[in-house]
Image (cartoon, rainbow, N blue to C red):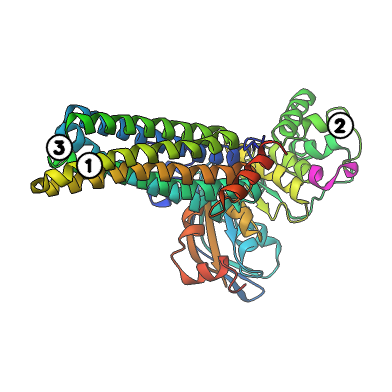
């Protein structure tokens, strides 16, 4: 008898076609310091995966690895592979612009451009110079609907984005990323600057977005990781200590370090 | 009247999880109710094979308790529930323990029947069936009160336990009389007494469940309080 509808497929049971990102032996050195050490993990498609760990453990670096943002740091050394759609994104011939279209990113602080709401969402599409005005209009509307913002801004699309509240601005950032129809959405502490209610709205939005997009999120809020993510990875000093479905990690962690971290014994 | 709507969270998935949890208790309750119906029929028609099935099916009820408890633990760990949500999770966890024990009491009677040591004459049989039917009614009203989080209905179930206790005492008097005259069948009479005691205990578990329902819906803990205080608390909840 199936009493409970919530079910997360254990990582071991995932088939290759269910994997959106396959990270193999990834090591990252930034400014001569090892930040990530031999990380291997498979991120399931159409799910929410959280990365948790104390400050400076390498969470954001791992997230940035998935759209090659670490290369913006002058002194970097990256080894290992990150497979997406059978392509190693770390390959030197990989088209980084195309990669960043496929892998959208939203940061901790909403950072709208000093433009209108409409221009903010359509910015990436316009840059690509391959869409008609009508196509862009449609894509903007769709992105705002998917980001749960359309009803609130449809009558003021040409007003400055800065007039929106913090929670609305963050949803605008998600809409901006969604307009490019990314396969993967990276969220770096997306709600840490928001109040509890705006946080819940973003979390609920993430639940609906995962129907079409794979979401990887870095969060300091363990309760948030427990609440909304299907899978959780715990990183400590650049090493992947434990990575499993969130239900198991938050009820029966296998490693003492994970137990100590999630129960607030250190970190 | 105190009533909590668990379907109003911003998180739709949390709504679903709480709804599933509540429904799981009703599923488990339905199973136990069916077990009791079967055991009463087994008594009525002296059906050892039906009683054997009841004994076997008790494993299923035990499994439901484990599953529901696991889900309670998961929700506590991942959702950090508060206020009425927390009361629901805690209530469900305690409720399933009592329902599982009801299942054990039923299985105990079924075991005696399947072993052929629950041989009773027609008069005691009739009284036992009446007792069983009264317990089924009490159980149904308890689960109904749980489903509707109805403090008033839960409070009324308390009174039904007095009816059950009276019927149980009545049968025990008859049994004592038989025992005096048929000492050679001591094992049989002891099994019957133990079986009847098990049935009576189901009423006590229903009472426990009602206490949890009142705590869930009204936030008032009425356990281990005097009848007077309890009635006062319930009255305040029903007509604040």
Regarding residue A3, the answer to whether it shows in the image is: no
Query: How far is disc 1 from disc 2 in space, using C-alphas?
Result: 84 Å
For disc 2, the chain is A
Mark 2 closeness class: few <14, some 14–19, many ≥20 residues within 10 Å? some
Instruction: Kindly identify which residue carries mark 3.
Output: B119
Residue numbers of the magenta segment: A162-169
Position of B165 relative to A51 (above/below): above
Find residue A2 and report its image quarter.
top left
- For the residue labelled by badge 1, is the local secondary structure a helix, a strand or a loop? helix
Residue A116: x percent and y percent?
88, 38
Quarter of the picture holding the N terminus of chain A: top left
Of badges 1 and 2, the one in the foreground is: 1
Mark 1 closeness class: few <14, some 14–19, many ≥20 residues within 10 Å? some
Position of residue A197 in the picture relative to residue A216 (left or right):
right
Find residue A139 and report its image quarter.
top right
Query: How far is disc 1 from disc 3 in space, using C-alphas?
Result: 12 Å
Residue B184: x percent and y percent?
8, 48
Q: What residue sits 83% from the left and 28% below the top?
A: A154
């Amino acid at each position: 008898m199936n009493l409970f509808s919530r079910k997360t497929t254990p990582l071991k049971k995932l088939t290759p076609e269910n994997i959106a990102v396959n990270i193999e032996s990834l090591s990252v050195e930034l400014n001569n310091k090892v930040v990530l050490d031999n990380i291997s993990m498979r991120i399931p498609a159409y799910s929410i995966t959280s990365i948790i760990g104390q400050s400076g453990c390498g969470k954001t670096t791992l997230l940035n690895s998935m759209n090659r943002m670490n290369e913006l740091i002058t002194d970097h050394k990256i080894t290992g592979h990150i497979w997406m759609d059978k392509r190693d994104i770390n390959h030197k011939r990989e088209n980084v612009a195309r990669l960043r279209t496929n892998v959208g990113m939203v940061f901790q602080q909403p950072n709208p451009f000093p433009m209108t709401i409409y221009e903010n969402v359509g910015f990436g599409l316009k840059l690509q110079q391959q869409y008609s005005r009508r196509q862009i209009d449609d894509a903007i509307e769709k992105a705002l609907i998917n980001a749960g913002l359309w009803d609130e801004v449809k009558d003021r699309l040409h007003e400055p984005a800065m007039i929106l509240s913090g929670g609305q601005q963050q949803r605008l950032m998600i809409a901006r990323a969604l307009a490019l129809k990314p396969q993967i959405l990276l969220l770096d502490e997306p709600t840490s600057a928001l109040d509890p209610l705006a946080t819940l709205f973003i979390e609920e939005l993430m639940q609906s977005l995962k129907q079409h997009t794979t979401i990887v999120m870095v969060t300091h809020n363990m309760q948030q990781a427990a609440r909304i993510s299907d899978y959780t990875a715990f990183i400590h000093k650049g090493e992947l200590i434990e990575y499993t479905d969130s239900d198991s990690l938050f009820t029966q962690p296998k490693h003492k370090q994970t137990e100590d971290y999630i129960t607030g014994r250190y970190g | 009247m105190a009533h909590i709507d668990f379907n109003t969270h911003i998180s739709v998935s949390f709504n679903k999880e709480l709804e599933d949890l509540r429904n799981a208790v009703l599923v488990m309750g339905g199973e136990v109710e069916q077990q009791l119906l079967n055991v009463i029929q087994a008594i009525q028609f002296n059906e050892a094979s039906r009683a054997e099935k009841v004994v076997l099916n008790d494993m299923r009820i035990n499994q439901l308790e484990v599953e529901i408890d696991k889900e309670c633990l998961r929700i506590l760990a991942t959702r950090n529930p508060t206020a009425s949500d927390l009361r629901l999770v805690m209530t469900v966890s305690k409720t399933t323990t009592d329902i599982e024990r009801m299942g054990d009491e039923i299985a105990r009677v079924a075991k005696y029947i399947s072993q052929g040591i629950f041989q009773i004459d027609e008069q005691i049989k009739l009284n036992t069936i009446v007792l069983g039917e009264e317990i089924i009614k009490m159980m149904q009203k308890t689960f109904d009160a749980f489903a509707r989080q109805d403090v008033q209905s839960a409070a009324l179930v308390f009174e039904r336990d007095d009816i059950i206790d009276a019927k149980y005492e009545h049968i025990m008097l008859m049994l004592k009389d038989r025992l005096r005259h048929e000492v050679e069948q001591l094992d049989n009479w002891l099994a019957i007494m133990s079986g009847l005691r098990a049935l009576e205990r189901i009423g006590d578990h229903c009472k426990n469940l009602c206490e949890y329902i009142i705590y869930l819906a009204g936030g008032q803990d009425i356990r281990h309080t005097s009848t007077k205080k309890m009635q006062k608390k319930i009255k305040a909840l029903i007509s604040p």
